[in-house]
Image (cartoon, grey):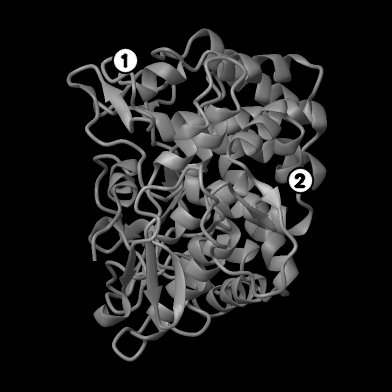
Amino acid sequence: MRIAAAAVLALAWAGPQALPREPGPEAPAPRPLSHEQLLTEVQRRAFRFFWERTDPRTGLADDRASNFSARNNYTVASIASTGYALASLPIAVERGWIGRTTARDRALLTLRFLNRRFPHKRGWCYHFVDRRTGQRVWKSEISSVDTSLMVLGALMAGQYWRGTQVERLANALYDRMDWTWMRTNGGQKPGKLLVSHGWRPEEGFLKNDWGRYCELMLIYLLGMGAAKDPLPAESWTAWERDVVEYRGRTTLAGGPIFMHQMAHGFFDFRGRRDILGWDYWVASREAVLINRQFALDRAGTRKTYGPAVWGLNAGDGPDGYRAYGGPGEEDGTVSPTGAIASILFTPDLARQAAWEMHRRFGGRIWGRYGFSNGFNLDRNWHGPDVIGIDLGMALLAIEDARTGLPWRLMRSHPFHARAFRKAGFRVTREPQPRPLRIAPPAAGQPRAAHSSSTRTAGRAA
């Protein structure tokens, strides 16, 4: 099947890095933990990554790090990882891992650098930068999605420390974003409704727009809710929503599991439908169940997959960074954080997956920052690294499932109500199970492009 443009873009998220290194000798298996103890430890170790792997001068967080080596020779930061680092601070304070003042000082360090010294173009930032200086590396792009993740993390921290300089600096990052520039390709396409993937000084705007369902919801909600230069409401209905069916389940198309998780870490879509009648929580729940079933259907030929060992995601594999998905590309590689971040939609299955992978494979994939990014028993490969954005997604998802803190902080910012109003979100009370979509909108309401197209993926099994 075709992998959506956003999933292909995910390949670039790893940058031109060397292939994952082989780990050293197998470590002793970790001590047994209960399901809830393990989730707490997953969160705590994810936060440890953001705390330890943030530059003490700039506040920029590493894109990735070794999960088993104390050496920190990596110098490349990701602005998305930096956003998750900011979002992790309120969670760490509430869980007692760090003091409130110490966490606030870290937030201020990062936000001051981002506002005063970090290179940007009309409020949009380079994807990969030198953690020590903030300067662009690898000729990476000005990235709309990664800048959005950075700003969402900043806003979460700002709402936790309301009435302080943290809030003011976070809002300053948001207010400087030129949404019209990113939407219209610098004015070249004034009628365009879709946001560009980004811009490079060598070539200008990238060819692709955010025009098909994936993690893009976080971009459009952030843009539509902006107090200055917001995206029009029509941008929400302009992107395509293709439907895919697999083994009797129906969801919105998108292979790698992160595409169905990332926006939900910041926004609570439960019990809500947008102006077009879509329930995105249902879409993600069904996508998770399809992802797991897709792996189970191949368990006879893949050693890794099993009832509690699944999670096909964009991430590290034995041959480098790949956009694994279910349905989609697969080679037996499993992403532990992909399964764990599904806790919002399938809590029991996510807990079981975390516990089973920790019990069976912890000696090879459980390290200083929690679960490594991927492993593959068919290839006898156990990834040595963790990736910041995947740790961040798992950290937020677990906290949302437990206390709802990230969601509450997002809802407390005025942009949230503006964005949800523009997208036409409304709470609907319906008998379970809720359908993916209700009847098409009444005459006169906008319709999503290609929203009724359906593809059957089961034939590929």
Asked if residue 194 can be seen in this view, the reply is yes
In the picture provided, is 23 more to the left or to the right than 399? left
Q: Earlier in the sequence, mark 2 or mark 1?
A: 1
Task: Please tell me which residue lies in front, 411 or 279.
Answer: 279
In the picture provided, is 84 more to the left or to the right than 347? left
Q: Residue 413, how many percent across, how many down? A: 72, 29
Local SS, label 1: loop
State whether residue 134 is above or below residue 439. Answer: above
Q: Give the class, few, some or many, for how many residues have Cα within 10 Å of label 1's Cα (few <14, many ≥20).
A: some
Q: How many marks?
A: 2
In the picture provided, is 391 more to the left or to the right than 214? right
Task: Please tell me which residue lies in front, 211 or 397.
Answer: 211
| Residue underneath mark 2 | 405
What is the quadrant of residue 432 in the picture?
bottom right
Mark carried by residue 186: 1
Q: Give the class, few, some or many, for how many residues have Cα within 10 Å of label 2's Cα (few <14, many ≥20).
A: some
Q: Which residue type carries mark 2? A: Leu
Residue at left 64%, top 20%?
170
For marks 2 and 1, give the one nearer the viewer.
Answer: 1
Task: Please tell me which residue lies in front, 356 or 448.
Answer: 448
Q: Residue 332, how many percent across, how many down? A: 32, 75
Q: Which residue type carries mark 1? A: Gly
Q: Residue furthest front?
A: 443
State whether residue 317 is above or below residue 141. Answer: below
